[in-house]
Image (tube, coloured by chain):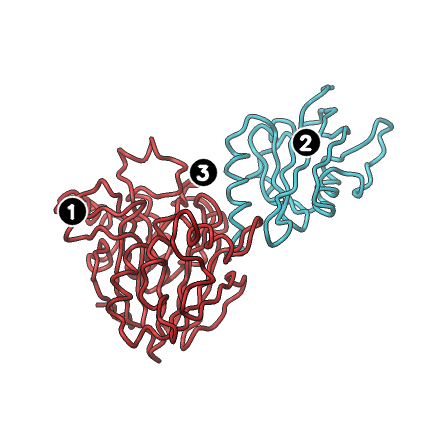
Amino acid sequence: MAEAQRPVELILARSLIDTLSTPGFLVDEEGIVVFFNDAASVLLGVRFEEVGRMGPERWSTEFGPFDEAGERVPPEDLPLTIALRHGRPSTARFRIHSLKGTEHEIEAAAVPIMTVGGTSGAMVFFWTLEES
Amino acid sequence: MRVKVWGARGSVPAPGPETVRYGGNTSCVEITLSDGTLLALDAGTGIRSMGLALGERGRRINILLTHLHMDHIQGLMFFAPAFNPTAEMVIWGPEAADASLRDRIARYISAPLSPVEVRELPCNVSFNEAPHSEWRIGSATVRAASVTHRGPTLGYRVTEGDVSLCYIPDHEPALGANLERDDPEWISGFNLAQGATVLLHDGQYTSAEYPSRTGWGHSKLSDALAFARRVETERLVVFHHDPLHSDDMLDALQGSAMERWAELGGEPTGLEFAAERRELVIDRAPR
């Protein structure tokens, strides 16, 4: 059964992210990852088409993020959460695991997608700082 | 539901001997519901002729604006009911972050672009941002949805009984999307147009023109056909003709579109190009 129609702002954001070589993610207003691009799939070790949309719990279980001590970063401290809850851009550094066993230190920037009706989602971009 | 096209041209009026059959007036479509309720879809220059033809029927009218580009509002200042003190005019349109619908329309109906201010219009006029959920106008339900175009832009679906007209005159759903393969949730306007009895849809550009106009918010003809087939409308009426496209050119485009339409599995009676003064009666068997 078809999903409900996405807001046009998310449709356009998905198109933008799909064309970028910067790792990018699109998240809906409930924090579900509804798309990530090929550049992000290199970091994660898996293509979006293989995993489909992911809620925060599944994302956290499979990829992290973790702080320098290896502890999970609390959801409320993540740029994505701040962007969605407070409607403002946010950045942070943390580490993620890929499904291929590699670990990346990244800087993430989340930008809320604001419309006249409120926040309809967010775009999140990753910059790799270190790979191990 | 009775429908009459008063303007099918896009971007700018294109009067002249080259455009007499399809017409040179910009977007305006009249709908008369079964209970007599009158609607106008957009207020391009076509609404001027519509207003002159309405007579007493123009005493109460709902105008549904898709967006506020000039080719969709220019006729408002020349719409006879607007200057009738006994007429009531209800204008619907997209909401925007910067100003109310009334204030945004007033940028046109005010100096130096106009000799008359909105507050001076003799009719009883009101402005409403289109709701996010369905609402009723007369015997129809109306739904609006944001669609891919430049700036806040709506498409409308007017449903009466088991027939519906979907109107998306300015729309570029193929921008960054694959209309044949992408999931419907990622195709702009899909839900709005799905299964509509009649779809009036942007088909402004040829395939040769589109590459230099990508992102301007309009569709090439082949994308309009693909969108219409994907949403399984019963009839596509290609709308928003480019001002550079003469009658002869539109005839030729219609011929090639018919071939493509058939390749996509469409019925021959399910495709036409909008022409000024064209009337449709929409029931279960459009004719």
Q: Which mark is residue B121?
A: none
Q: Residue at image x 22%, y 66%? A: B279
Q: Residue at image x 45%, y 46%? A: B148
Horizontal relation, residue B178 to residue A57: left or right: left
Mark toward the viewer: 3 or 1: 1
Mark 3 surroundings: few (<14), some (14-19) or many (≥20) residues within 10 A:
some
Looking at numbered disc 2 in the image, what kind of residue is underneath it? Answer: Leu
Residue B114 x, y percent position in the rendering: 38, 52
SS at badge 2: loop
Q: Residue at image x 54%, y 61%? A: B132
Looking at numbered disc 3 in the image, what kind of residue is underneath it? Answer: Gly
Check the residue under mark 3 and report the chain it is in. B
Q: Which mark is residue A99?
A: 2
Horizontal relation, residue B225 to residue A128: left or right: left
Relative to B120, residue B205 above or below: above
Q: How many numbered tags mark residues here? A: 3
Which quadrant holds the C terminus of chain A? Answer: top right
Q: Earlier in the sequence, mark 3 or mark 1?
A: 1
- Are the numbered discs 2 and 3 placed on the same chain, yes or no? no
Relative to B278, residue A30 above or below: above
Q: Nearer the viewer, residue B37 or A104?
A: B37
The extreme bottom residue here reads B35
Q: Could one spot residue A103 in this view of the protein? A: no
Check the residue under mark 1 and report the chain it is in. B
Residue B221 x, y percent position in the rendering: 28, 44
Please give the residue where the numbered disc 3 appears in the rendered image. Answer: B176
Badges 3 and 1: C-beta atoms under 8 Å apart? no
Please give the residue where the numbered disc 1 appears in the rendered image. Answer: B16
- Are the numbered discs 2 and 1 placed on the same chain, yes or no? no
Q: Chain B's colour?
A: red
> What's the CA distance linking mark 2 and mark 1?
65 Å
